[in-house]
Image: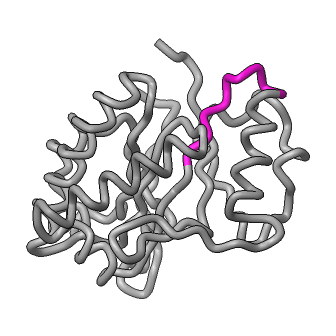
Amino acid sequence: VQSYLLGCYYDYNQPLVLPEQLPIGVCTHVLLIGAIIVKNLGVNIIQHPYNGLNALQSMRNYRIRDSNKLKVIPSLIGDDIEWQIAIKDSKSRMKFIVSLVEFAKSQNIDGLDFDWEYPCGTYKSLYSQFIEELRIVIQKTFGDEFLLTTAVGAGKYTIDNCYEIERLGQLLDLIHLMTYDYHSKIFSFVCNRDVHRG
């Protein structure tokens, strides 16, 4: 059992710190967000000097410097329509899953993270179905070591209406709460919990 886990999102659209400048041993998981998108039932990589395949390679180099302890996980983003097309039926899901597995094999990564804001309505159960089908293929292809994670909205309304959270909790290795969503025009206050008290 890992005693220390700190996932760090690395936005390689606007890197303030390059991967080679990150301190070794702080982050246990780095989620690369900003250049890998869901499009046409597959994975598309947007190339810029500091992101895309360049960022993946930089993070793989960082992982070697960290004695291969760091987990490198691209975070897939995309607009609602692309996500909906990718998971709407079993044929689309399988095509998307094959694309994800091919991408994972070619990039020597430790997992995949999904950042869909948000799979509400009909897509709530379809998203869980997609994750379940992907988990089966990932298990057969990579075994237990390959991680599947997702980012979810942190507000109760979003969680209740957009995620089968109990089902996802059994299928995913990590669920990241987008806590920056706690404070907005809709929610004018933030509740606080003293993490140092029982």
Q: Quadrant of residue 137?
A: top left
Q: Is residue 194 visible?
A: no
Q: Which residues are magenta?
A: 65-73
Which corner quadrant holds the C terminus? Answer: top left
Judge from the rendering whether residue 157 lies leftward or rightward of residue 20; answer left or right: left
Q: Is residue 192 above or below residue 37?
A: above
Q: Give the percent coordinates (x, y) of residue 145.
A: 44, 24
Q: Give the percent coordinates (x, y) of residue 187.
A: 37, 78
Q: Is residue 159 visible?
A: yes
Q: Give the percent coordinates (x, y) of residue 38.
A: 42, 70
Judge from the rendering whether residue 89 lies leftward or rightward of residue 134; answer left or right: left
Q: Is residue 66 magenta?
A: yes
Q: Is residue 117 above or below residue 153?
A: below
Q: Quadrant of residue 126?
A: bottom left
Asked which colour scheme the image uses, the reply is one colour
The residue under the point 82% across, 31% down is 24
Front residue of 39/65: it is 39
Q: Is residue 192 magenta?
A: no
Q: Is residue 25 above or below residue 149?
A: above
The residue under the point 30% across, 53% down is 97
Q: Give the percent coordinates (x, y) of residue 121.
A: 12, 75
Judge from the rendering whether residue 166 lies leftward or rightward of residue 143; answer left or right: left
